[in-house]
Image: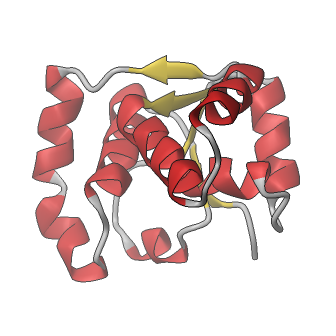
Amino acid sequence: MPETILDASAVLAYLQQEPGHDLVETALMDQAVISAVNLAEVVAKLTDGGMPESIVEEVLDDLALMVIPLDIPVAKITGFLIPQTKPYGLSLGDRACLALATFRKSPVLTADRQWLALSLPIDIRLIRP
C-alpha cells in the first residue's frame, strides 16, 4: 500500500478529534508522512492555541510521523503550483503538501475542500464529506 501524505489540516483534525479523524488514524497506522513545512504549520497552530512547547513535543513524538524535508525538487514543484493554486487562496504549506504528493505519487489527506477544484495528477482525499 502506498504511503499517504498528511496535510496539516488532517493532522490537526486528528489531534482535536474532529470529524474525519478516524481516516487520519487509519493512515497513521499505515505509512503516513508529512512535509516539514506542514509539520511547522501543525506546531504553529498548537502553539498559537496555547499548548506548551513540551506538550507539543510529546504530541508529535506520539504521532511518530515520518517527516520529509523540503528538498530542491519538491521546493520547485511547490513554487510552480502558484498559478494553479493562487485563485483558491492556498498557502505555502498547502502547496508544499500538494508538491510532496505529486513528487512521491502518493495520495494526500486533507480537510481543505477547495483542493478538489485543482486539476492535479494526484489523489486528493477529503477527511470529511
Depicted 98 relative to depicted 75: above or below: below
Query: To which quarter of the image does residue 53 belong?
Result: top right
The extreme bottom residue here reads 87
* Residue at image coords 31%, 68%: 90
* Residue at image coords 83%, 26%: 29
Query: To which quarter of the image does residue 21 belong?
Result: bottom right
Depicted 108 relative to depicted 60: above or below: below
Residue 78 in the image: x percent, y percent?
20, 45
The reply, left or right, for residue 88 in relation to residue 67 is: left
Which residue occupies the foreground of this view, 14 or 3? Answer: 14
Q: How is the image coloured?
A: secondary structure
The reply, left or right, for residue 128 in relation to residue 17 is: left
Query: To which quarter of the image does residue 36 belong?
Result: top left
Depicted 128 relative to depicted 70: above or below: below
* Residue at image coords 44%, 32%: 105
Which residue occupies the foreground of this view, 70 or 39? Answer: 39
Residue 113 in the image: x percent, y percent?
55, 75
Residue 112 in the image: x percent, y percent?
53, 69
Depicted 95 relative to depicted 89: above or below: above
* Residue at image coords 49%, 21%: 67
* Number of numbered discs visible in the structure rendering: 0
Q: Is residue 59 visible?
A: yes
Residue 45 in the image: x percent, y percent?
52, 55
Q: Is residue 1 visible?
A: no
Can you say which quadrant of the picture contains the C terminus? bottom right
Which residue occupies the foreground of this view, 127 or 38? Answer: 38
The reply, left or right, for residue 52 in relation to residue 39 is: right
Can you say which quadrant of the picture contains the N terminus? top right
